[in-house]
């Protein structure tokens, strides 16, 4: 899971109308970027891991101005021979004692992480330029 947010947004000294417009634009920019990166993550997941690819999703919290990209979870939970539950997404990303790592999540994030800042800058500037 990776999370991008703007925790100090509310402290901006703007009118309520401009702040609402800015919030909408910035959230849109973050969401669009996150959706694009989530698609890269799906493409990077091993071909034989359909449930893993399908588990990649984006969650948006408009109130907190936060976007989260996640993979794994309940749909990729498996059980070991001794009956312990584990998240197969983590096993693929980091490897196990029996399986080498096949990273798909963080390499995709790392390759494009600067785009979140660019999206905030671009969408924020557009909203402020509208006056």
Image: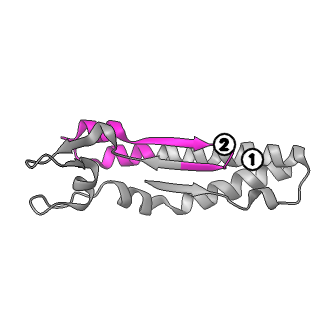
Examine the image and state in which quarter residue 119 appears. bottom right
Residue 30 spot, x, y in % from top left:
60, 49
**Residue 51 position (above or below residue 12):** above
Residue 45 in the figure: left or right of residue 68: left
Q: Which residue is mark 1?
A: 23
State which mark lies toward you, 2 or 1: 2
Along the line of sight, the residue nearer the viewer: 119 or 17: 17
Residue 9 spot, x, y in % from top left:
75, 57
Residue 26 in the figure: left or right of residue 51: right
Task: Say which element carries label 2.
Answer: loop
Residue 27 spot, x, y in % from top left:
66, 46
Residue 31 spot, x, y in % from top left:
58, 44
Disc 2 crowd rating (10 Å Cα; few below 14, some 14-19, many 20+) is few
Mark 2 vs 1: CB contact within 8 A:
yes
**Residue 111 position (above or below residue 86):** below
Residues shaded magenta: 38-67
Mark-to-mark CA distance, 2 and 1 = 8 Å
Q: Which residue is mark 2?
A: 62
Q: How many marks?
A: 2
Mark found first going from the N terminus, 2 or 1: 1
Say whether residue 31 is visible.
Answer: yes
Point 69% across, 49% down: residue: 26
């Amino acid at each position: 899971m990776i999370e991008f947010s703007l925790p100090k947004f509310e402290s901006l000294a703007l009118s309520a109308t401009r702040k609402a417009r800015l919030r909408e634009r910035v959230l849109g920019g973050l969401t669009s970027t996150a959706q694009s990166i989530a698609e890269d993550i799906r493409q990077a997941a091993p071909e034989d891991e359909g449930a893993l690819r399908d588990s990649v999703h984006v969650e948006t919290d408009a109130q907190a101005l936060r976007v989260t990209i996640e993979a794994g979870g309940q749909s990729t939970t498996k059980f070991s021979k001794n009956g312990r539950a584990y998240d197969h997404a983590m096993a693929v990303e980091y490897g196990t004692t029996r399986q080498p790592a096949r990273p798909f999540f963080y390499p995709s994030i790392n390759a494009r992480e600067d785009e979140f800042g660019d999206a905030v800058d671009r969408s924020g500037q557009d909203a402020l330029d509208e006056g």
